[in-house]
Image (spheres, rainbow, N blue to C red):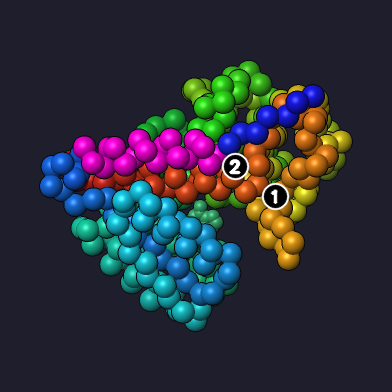
């Protein structure tokens, strides 16, 4: 079977142009400040630094202002909470994120709860997360939104289909399971959320029309675990000395799936662009 690629780079470029046009029309032409994203990064985790640098590049590319607060690895929880309050109160900052993971001495729940939900462009605060689950207007986490938007663009039928998600993280697995199962478009799928404690995962994945893999293990999903014609979404990204790998064993899936997201160039660019779209929405909500 011919496997087609779900091209995140291409769609992210289209969305980028739409965002730029809106910024021109609603902010620049009206002599208003352009949208402004705040980023708080703690410590020296290489992957986090790369993610943040990519987010900054995207801001520069698109014409969104950004402020980066890079705090040392030993920053106390108190100090981090103070920095969050500064971003909450700074009227120049439309939305901001605290890059995860955090160091072990910091309580992640306290951090998420301290972010003003109106500026929570990651969509991790319980107010946004709860609204998302209740099908209300809210900020949705960027990766989940990116997956939905990409599937929608390629006219992948979700309604009435069986979707299996691997991984239950707050950042990807849990939110995409909520969005895919909503009585809404896109969504309306029958969803199973599998995770590290699921026995015989392949019993589920083999039946799935859509498999979304966000498990953080390189090459986890193999061709023998899916049915012919399934749509496969790979959220993972891992670098070794030779190449970049996803959570999907691309070679054994290619030729069996109907569609697959490449790594790189699939969900990564979609995640970054959705964060900026959320920032634009925050600026529109809070200032116009
Ligand atoms: N770490 C990995 N992905 C994300 C994300 O989408 N947002 C934040 N804040 N941290 C992350």
Measured from the top left, where is residue 14 in percent x and y?
43, 35
SS assignment at label 1: loop
Mark pair 2, 1: CA separation: 10 Å
Which of 99 and 198 lies nearest the eye of the viewer? 99
Measured from the top left, where is residue 219 in percent x and y?
78, 49
Q: Is residue 230 visible?
A: no
Tell me the quarter of the image containing the C terminus: top left
Magenta-colored segment: predominant secondary structure: helix
Relative to residue 82, is residue 112 depicted above or below?
Answer: above
Query: Sequence order check: which comes first, mark 2 or mark 1?
Result: 1
Relative to residue 247, is residue 259 depicted above or below?
Answer: above
Magenta-drawn segment? 8-25
The furthest residue to the bottom? 74
- Left or right of 166: which side holds 34? left
Image point 37% across, 67% down: which residue? 68
The residue singled out by tag 1 in the image is 246
Please say if the residues under marks 2 and 1 sit with CB atoms less than 8 Å apart: yes
The residue singled out by tag 2 in the image is 266
Measured from the top left, where is residue 86 in percent x and y?
28, 67
């Amino acid at each position: 079977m011919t496997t087609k690629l779900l091209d995140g780079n291409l769609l992210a470029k289209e969305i980028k142009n739409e965002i730029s046009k809106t910024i021109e029309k609603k902010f620049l032409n009206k002599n208003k400040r352009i949208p402004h994203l705040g980023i708080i990064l703690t410590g020296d985790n290489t992957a986090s630094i790369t993610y943040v640098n990519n987010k900054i590049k995207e801001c520069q590319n698109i014409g969104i202002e950004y402020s980066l607060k890079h705090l040392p690895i030993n920053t106390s929880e108190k100090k981090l909470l103070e920095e969050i309050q500064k971003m909450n109160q700074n009227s120049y900052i439309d939305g901001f994120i605290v890059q995860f993971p955090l160091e072990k001495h910091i309580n992640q729940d306290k951090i998420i709860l301290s972010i003003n939900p109106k500026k929570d462009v990651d969509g991790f605060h319980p107010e946004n997360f709860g609204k998302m689950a209740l099908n209300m207007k809210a900020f949705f986490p960027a990766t989940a939104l990116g997956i939905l938007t990409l599937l929608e663009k390629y006219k992948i039928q979700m309604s009435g289909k069986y979707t299996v998600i691997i991984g239950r993280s707050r950042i990807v697995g849990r939110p995409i399971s909520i969005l895919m199962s909503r009585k809404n478009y896109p969504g309306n799928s029958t969803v199973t959320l599998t995770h590290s404690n699921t026995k015989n995962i392949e019993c589920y994945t083999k039946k799935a029309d859509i498999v979304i893999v966000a498990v953080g293990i390189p090459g986890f999903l193999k061709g023998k675990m899916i049915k012919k014609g399934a749509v496969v979404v790979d959220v993972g990204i891992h670098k070794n000395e030779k190449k970049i790998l996803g959570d999907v064993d691309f070679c054994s899936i290619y030729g069996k799936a109907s569609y697959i997201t490449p790594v790189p160039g699939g969900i990564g660019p979609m995640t970054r662009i959705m964060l900026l779209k959320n920032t634009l929405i925050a600026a529109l909500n809070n200032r116009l």
